[in-house]
């Protein structure tokens, strides 16, 4: 059967036509503020006329005619993340609390992981995983852009994660790979690629993923299962499979006026684009009622005292910080992990907490990630540029800046949001923005 026939069979004629008509309309654009770097007051001072998300307080709808948010230096600086409005509801409903240990099993490109980090507020620990190495690299770049200090990015299979982290996490997100019916307005190729057989194949995968993800929860821990598709086989049937094979139970999600109740599962919700202002999602909250054996080690070999002292000297000269955690060294690169981070030695890790920088001949060279994690109050020298200024655009192009400043490393900010480093003699600023990120 084709997609139209499938939706008619799923929803009935009247509701199916309403959904299909909405999917012929333009997609809706939304962004979510990075609360690690900004706040609503600062953002609204720059953009006072945007409509607010009904449920996610730090999110705003925008039109591409309003402003090119994806092309702005503010985007490079990680002030916000452009994300579907319905996708934001997944983490919102999970109710992340500070100090939670959180797993995002299929995390790329990072929308949900960066939202988790924003709510953790530099406490707790986030493992953002994606089995696809190329997608995991994009995930790692977004974790860096948003200035997140307390995340590890890995590229492992769900079964490897489940066997390594049984019973370890307080919260788990499984935003499962799906047939993407909620992406049809954004991506015509996804629509053209849809087949019913693909839905059946994905349902089999999702059932494997949900068991592996559930295994990572401690007793009374909570998992959110979500997809951006409407197929019953990929949503309700996957939840039913979990309930049949474990002692899991569902947590009720209050039904707002623009939420639909899931089929035969009153606790879960469906968000349809003809009713909810977004592209569409299925969301279910699950409580773990099983005792999973936690054997996770939290030992990571620390960096030498000499290496830490080299960094502390840089910190004394250039920063107003006293960074705490576990310092580890990978080759010449120094990283900072939150205390009691799980052992990294058996994982394919792409990002080890906060990448501080490189030690070269007893000198410390700061990494771009360190700049993005800071604030102008935490450095001894900074340049604060307007996001629409020529200087901001020149910096993103990798050009030398001629601006009065202080000698040494300067933190470049746009509207108070950190963007990267320069190294200055006091007036000429050598551009240290990474070559791979520059706008040419």
Image (tube, grey):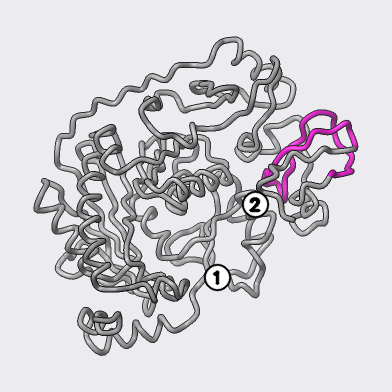
Front position in the image: 121 or 5: 5
Q: Quadrant of the N terminus?
A: bottom left
Main secondary structure type of the part rendered in magenta: strand
Rendered position, 94 above or below 361: below
Q: Position of residue 89 (x, y in %)?
A: 38, 60
Q: On the picture, is 68 further left or further right than 430? A: left
In the image, residue 105 sits, relative to residue 279, either above or below, namely above
- Please tell me whether mark 2 sits on a helix, a strand or a loop: helix
Which secondary structure, mark 1?
loop
Which residue is at the front of the view, 66 or 228? 228
Name the residue beneath numbered marker 2: 76
C-alpha gap between disc 1 and disc 2: 23 Å
Q: Is residue 19 above or below residue 80?
A: below
First along the sequence among labels 1 and 2: 1
Is residue 423 shown in magenta?
yes
Residue plotted at (19% across, 30% down):
293
């Amino acid at each position: 059967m084709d997609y139209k026939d499938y939706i008619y069979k799923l929803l009935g004629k009247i509701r199916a036509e309403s959904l299909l008509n909405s999917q012929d309309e333009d997609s809706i654009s939304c962004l979510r503020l990075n609360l690690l770097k900004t706040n609503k007051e600062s953002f609204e001072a720059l953009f006072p006329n945007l409509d607010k998300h009904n449920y996610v307080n730090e999110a705003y709808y925008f039109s591409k005619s309003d402003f090119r948010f994806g092309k702005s230096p503010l985007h490079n600086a990680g002030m916000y993340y452009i994300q579907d409005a319905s996708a934001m509801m997944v983490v919102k409903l999970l109710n992340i609390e500070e100090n939670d240990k959180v797993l995002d099993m299929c995390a790329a490109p990072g929308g949900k992981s960066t939202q988790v980090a924003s709510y953790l507020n530099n406490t707790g620990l986030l493992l953002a995983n994606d089995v696809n190495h190329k997608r995991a690299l994009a995930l790692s770049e977004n974790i860096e852009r948003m200035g997140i200090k307390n995340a590890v990015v890995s590229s492992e299979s769900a079964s490897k994660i489940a066997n390594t982290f049984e019973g370890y996490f307080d919260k788990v997100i499984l935003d499962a790979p799906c047939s993407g019916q909620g992406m049809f307005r954004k991506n015509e190729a996804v629509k053209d690629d849809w087949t019913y057989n693909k839905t059946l194949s994905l349902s089999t995968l999702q059932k494997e993923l949900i068991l592996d993800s559930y295994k990572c929860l401690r007793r009374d821990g909570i998992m959110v299962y979500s997809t951006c598709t409407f197929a019953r086989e990929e949503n309700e049937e996957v939840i039913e499979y979990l309930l049949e094979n474990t002692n899991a139970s569902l947590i009720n999600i209050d039904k707002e006026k623009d939420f639909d109740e899931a089929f035969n599962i009153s606790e879960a919700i469906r968000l349809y684009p003809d009713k909810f202002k977004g592209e569409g999602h299925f969301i279910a909250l699950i409580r773990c009622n099983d005792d999973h054996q936690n054997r996770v080690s939290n030992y990571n070999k620390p960096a030498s005292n000499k290496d830490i002292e080299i960094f502390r000297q840089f910190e004394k000269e250039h920063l107003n910080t006293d960074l705490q955690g576990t310092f580890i060294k990978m080759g010449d690169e120094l990283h900072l992990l939150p205390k009691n981070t799980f052992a990294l030695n058996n994982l394919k890790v792409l990002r080890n907490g906060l990448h501080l920088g490189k030690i070269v001949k007893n000198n410390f060279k700061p990494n771009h990630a360190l700049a993005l994690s800071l604030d102008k109050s935490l450095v001894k020298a900074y340049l604060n540029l307007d996001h629409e200024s020529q200087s901001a655009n020149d910096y993103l192009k990798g050009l030398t800046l001629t601006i009065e400043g202080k000698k040494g490393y300067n933190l470049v900010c746009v509207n108070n949001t950190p963007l990267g480093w320069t190294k200055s003699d006091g007036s000429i600023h050598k551009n240290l923005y990474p070559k791979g990120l520059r706008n040419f």
